[in-house]
Image (cartoon, rainbow, N blue to C red):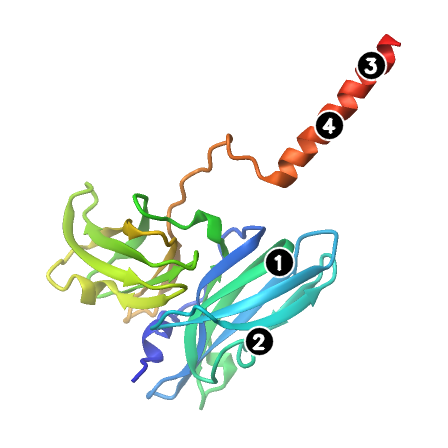
Amino acid sequence: MRRFTLPLLLLAAAQTALGAYADRDLIIPVVGRASSGGGRLFLTALWVTNSGDIPAALTLSYLESGHANPSPRKTSVTLAPHETRVFDPLGPPILTAINSIGALRLESNTNVTASARIYGYFIAQGPGSAVSMALTAIPTRLGIGNGQSAVIQGDGARDAVYKLYLVETAGAALSVAVSIEDLRGQTLGEKRLFLDRFEHIATDARQLFPAVTLDHAMIRIRGVNGNGRVIVAGTQTVPGSQDACTYEMSFTPEPRTRIRWPEAAVYVVVGIVVALAIVRRRQ
């Protein structure tokens, strides 16, 4: 049986979205729709903006949680230059079912930015009682692979619920080591997780490390075997106050020796123009 309420219990209090990334291949680590036994409805509002000056041919791939997604549900969307589209609430045909959670991949021919507002409210009280949090879409190129690692902050307060969302983005399997560290960097526990092709996993840090009791902790993710790449996000909810927030994984700066072909093409054109100008001056 799927646990639809587990990943979406991260919804508790309003929070402003973090800085957005503009890219052609993005991942939102968790989206979905679910109903809880307590009468609360959980929904997702998806925002997508075409950052370019040409129409964006956008493909949305839904990576359902709990299994590999070698052939995910795909939806095509076209955005005019600088157009923003809002899907609120997110559901079929983008999601595979009315009640479903997972990750969302956005692929485009031009740069786009995207974010998801995940919110929940008691059906009897209406949308005015909603509490929410926001997640920004992250470029897939920033995922970690074998031999790489990232840290996630925010695991604080012993009574807080801290969720981890992992999604494989390269279409290949990857085993990762998830460890919990104190603020001095000492590892107090470690678990291995296996992610298949485009698999999404939602898990609870307290369940992963039940013997570790810290007021504040760091989570480290390491790729240990395989050719896949993983994007990770964390969310913390304090049950008493319903205070909640999201945390992005750390990203390793890309070396400047790695130049993408559009940038390289610009340099080539500029070089040719400069060379022609020099030749003309000498004539």
Q: Is residue 241 left or right of residue 136?
A: left
Amino acid type of the residue that numbered disc 3 sits on in the rendered structure = Val
Mark 4 and mark 1: Cα distance apart in space: 27 Å
Q: Is residue 39 left or right of residue 209?
A: right
Looking at the image, which is closer to me, 69 or 89? 69
Question: Which quadrant is the C terminus positioned in?
Answer: top right
Instruction: Name the residue beneath numbered marker 2.
Output: 88
Q: Residue at x 56, y 80 (%)?
A: 93
* Count of picture labels: 4
Amino acid type of the residue that numbered disc 4 sits on in the rendered structure = Val
Amino acid type of the residue that numbered disc 1 sits on in the rendered structure = Ser
Q: Which mark is residue 108?
A: 1
User: Could you tell which of marks 1 and 2 lies nearer the N-terminus?
Assistant: 2
Q: Are marks 4 and 2 in contact (CB under 8 Å)?
A: no
| SS of the residue under disc 4 | helix
How far from the left and from the top, in percent, is residue 144?
37, 48
Say if residue 16 shows up in the picture: no
Residue sitting farthest toward the top:
282
Q: Nearer the observer, disc 1 or disc 2?
A: 1
How far from the left and from the top, in percent, is residue 26?
52, 57
User: Could you tell which of marks 3 and 4 lies nearer the N-terminus?
Assistant: 4
Q: Residue at x 51, y 31 (%)?
A: 256
Instruction: Name the residue beneath numbered marker 4.
Output: 270
Mark 1 and mark 2: Cα distance apart in space: 21 Å
Amino acid type of the residue that numbered disc 2 sits on in the rendered structure = Asp
Q: Residue at x 43, y 56 (%)?
A: 170
Q: Nearer the observer, disc 3 or disc 4?
A: 3
Instruction: Name the residue beneath numbered marker 3.
Output: 279
